[in-house]
Amino acid sequence: MNDKNDNTREDIIAGRNAVLELLKTDRHVECVYLQKGLSGTVLKIAAIAKDKGIVVKDVPQKKLDELCSGERHQGAAAQVSFVPYSELDDIFKKAEEANSQPFIIIADEIEDPHNLGAIIRSAEAAGAHGLIIPKRRSAGLSLVVSKTSAGAAAHLPVARVSNLGFAIETLQSRGVWIYAADTDGQNWCTLDYSGAVALVVGSEGRGIGRLIKEKSDFTVSLPMLGSLSSLNASVAAGIIMYEIARQRMKIPARNSLKTGNRN
């Protein structure tokens, strides 16, 4: 008989000893969650995690209770990657193997795992070669992201970087043009996306960070014809991704077979 809660997440490791043993392995850890105000073994976990460059978050007990779905956590839990991460070179290698110019998506602080999963799904479908996310203030390759991507996370290389600005500079040094999707740019379908391109998508609340936008080569916008001022990040990303895909596939923008008026 299985005494585990049916809602237990497969990407969450709960309990002090379990987290300590996890940190001894090579498995990629997204984040370590520690209950505020505790000492002893919890401080040891924090020190080991920080030494390995893992994000550590001090959270109230209620947050840990929710993460662990009722499992005994003793003030410590860790979230592991459900899919392994790639490197920037893996993304360029995928483009090279496809005999294509790199087509990359950069997710700037997309913290909602459902949005990140949807972006990954659209990126893979539109022919992107990889996605880049920052190490902090971003959803990672969790179980929720994997499920929302409908399996695309297993096929699209995702690189997790410590410094997104430096990653953009690296892309530019390798011939990639950076397009930032924001509200004050050029119309999305008037730009030339040929060659090596990377599309930056920001969160709904904050948009693209100022420094990231300044480092980008172009800013591209979607017209907002209704009462709202912005689209869901994954929806906006999907629209622009498919304009990039259309141009890369050399599909004409107009249907030249349509003539006259419909009566």
Image (tube, rainbow, N blue to C red):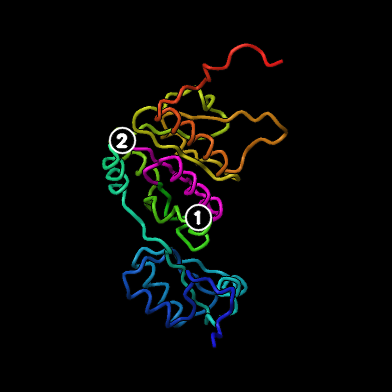
Report x, y in % for residue 12: 49, 71
Label ID, residue 177:
none
Residue 132 in view: yes
Q: Is residue 209 left or right of residue 102?
A: right
Observer-nearest residue: 60 or 198? 198
In the rendered view, tell whether residue 7 sits above or below residue 89: below
Residue annotated with mark 2: 100
Q: CA distance from mark 2 to mark 1?
A: 25 Å
Q: Amino acid at mark 2?
A: Ser
Residue 111 horizontal/vertical position (percent): 53, 53
* Mark number, residue 150: 1
Tag 1 secondary structure:
loop
Amino acid type, label 1: Ala
Q: Nearer the viewer, residue 61 or 224?
A: 224
Residue occupying the point 44% across, 37% down? 199
Foreground: 245 or 234? 245
Residue 11, magenta (yes or no)? no
Q: In which quadrant will I find the C terminus? A: top right
Q: Is 32 on the left-hand or right-hand side of 157?
A: right
Label 1 Cα neighbours within 10 Å, binned few <14 / some 14-19 / many ≥20: few
Pick the quarter of the image with the N terminus.
Answer: bottom right
Residue ranking furthest to the bottom? 1
Q: Estimate the x, y position of residue 259 in percent, counting from the top left.
A: 59, 13
Q: Is residue 173 left or right of residue 184?
A: left
Q: Residue 138: image x %, image y %?
A: 49, 54
Query: Where on the picture, by quarter, is residue 179?
Result: top left
Magenta-highlighted residues: 101-130
